[in-house]
Amino acid sequence: SPSDPDLVERARAAKEKLGDKVFVLGHHYQRDEVIQFADVTGDSFKLAKDAAARPEAEYIVFCGVHFMAESADILTSDDQKVVLPDLAAGCSMADMATAEQVAECWDVLAEAGIAEQVVPVSYMNSSADIKAFTGKHGGTICTSSNAKRALDWAFEQGEKVLFLPDQHLGRNTAVRDMGMSLDDCVLYNPHKPNGGLTVEQLRNAKMILWRGHCSVHGRFSLDSVNDVRERIPGVNVLVHPECKHEVVTAADYVGSTEYIIKTLQAAPAGSKWAIGTELNLVRRVANAHPDKEVVFLDKTVCFCSTMNRIDLPHLVWALESLAEGKLVNRIQVDTETESFAKLALERMLALP
Ligand code: 13P
Ligand code: SF4
């Protein structure tokens, strides 16, 4: 079983044997049994910055999902090998934008005569191919902690933004932080001809939102917010910006994983919080603050199933393999994709 003390001991021993040769990164949504072995934990922005922090480590074991491991490979040197303990740890949102669909979208924008005015801004939660497309077309990557700064930058470069692949982060940032209206945004559906949009709609739009979403955060609803306010008078509702616009609008605080953790640290004893994000993180935050009342925003359990694929048995297997000199589950982005994707990621890291 994952809590098997034997597995804990094996992970510890393999890590000790590897010493400085291994650097373990863990996203906040990872299981407790895994996060205890992370040298660094963070949200996706922090982990992208921290990936290059140990240039002497030969192996970077990434406890998170595929697109994060790809980004770590892009941002580290070629001698450093990035390992994802379970290759099935993908992200359904990232899968909602394929390279072909995005190339087709760009053709639609060109036919509408607006491609030159459009700057792509892609959420970190996208494949290396999409990041390369973004870099090639003068755009930047963003995460949930710097989406406003990324949009500020993009609107200095052009008049319109194509925001990929999370419609909610795009819409929430545009309307909540940039003062745009819902009418400034249109939704591009990659499964419909011309994205399901008329040329006029495309020409009038400021934000062209890709029709992608997170299946975990998409489960929170306006009812979840109303119910918790009724159940717990005086509760502060704190949600991730991947939630639907109506949820974000009804919440008191909105921010990335790292923001959620810091907000709870700063909150006074006795305060009450309902948090709308992934459950592993909410539980950890609740356990860290026994002096505050911390509840999950919705009663239905809400893990990210792909994040959870990285469990202790997979981590032990990866670490023991590496300790025996066997490289497993390497994530390696090809050179051409890497160069353009890196351009886009570096634009993000250089945002003011
Ligand atoms: P952050 O790590 O930027 O908060 O994003 C959450 C997420 O969905 C990661 O997949
Ligand atoms: Fe993807 Fe959502 Fe899971 Fe994050 S929480 S990895 S966006 S499916």
Image (cartoon, rainbow, N blue to C red):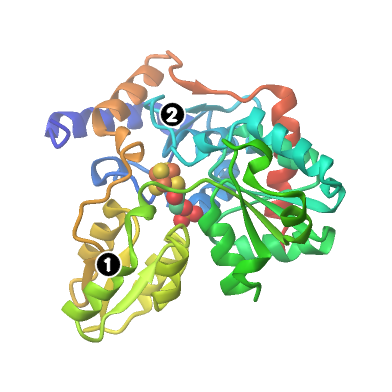
> Residue at the location (25% across, 86% down)?
234
Q: Is residue 272 left or right of residue 172?
A: left
Q: Which label's residue is closer to the chain start, 2 or 1?
A: 2
Is there any visible trace of residue 26 in the rendered image?
no
Residue 165 x %, y %: 57, 45
> Which class describes the residues within 10 Å of circle 1: few (<14), some (14-19), or many (20+)?
some
Q: Where is 329 relative to 29, above or below? A: above
Q: Quadrant of ligand 2?
A: top left
Near-viewer residue (154 or 192): 192
Disc 1 is placed on an element classified as helix
The answer to whether residue 263 is above or below residue 162 is below
Which quadrant of the rendered structure holds the C terminus? bottom right
- The residue singled out by tag 2 in the image is 84
Q: Is residue 15 visible?
A: yes
Q: Is 192 placed left or right of 30 in the picture?
A: right
Mark 2 belongs to which amino acid?
Leu
Q: Quadrant of residue 100?
A: top right
Residue 187 point in image, percent of width and height: 60, 52
Which residue shows up at 31% across the image and 56% down it?
281
Q: Write down the residue under mark 1.
A: 224
The residue closer to the viewer here, 159 or 183, is: 183
Horizontal arrangement in the rendering, residue 80 relative to residue 243 (left or right): right
Residue 250 screen position, x and y as percent:
40, 75
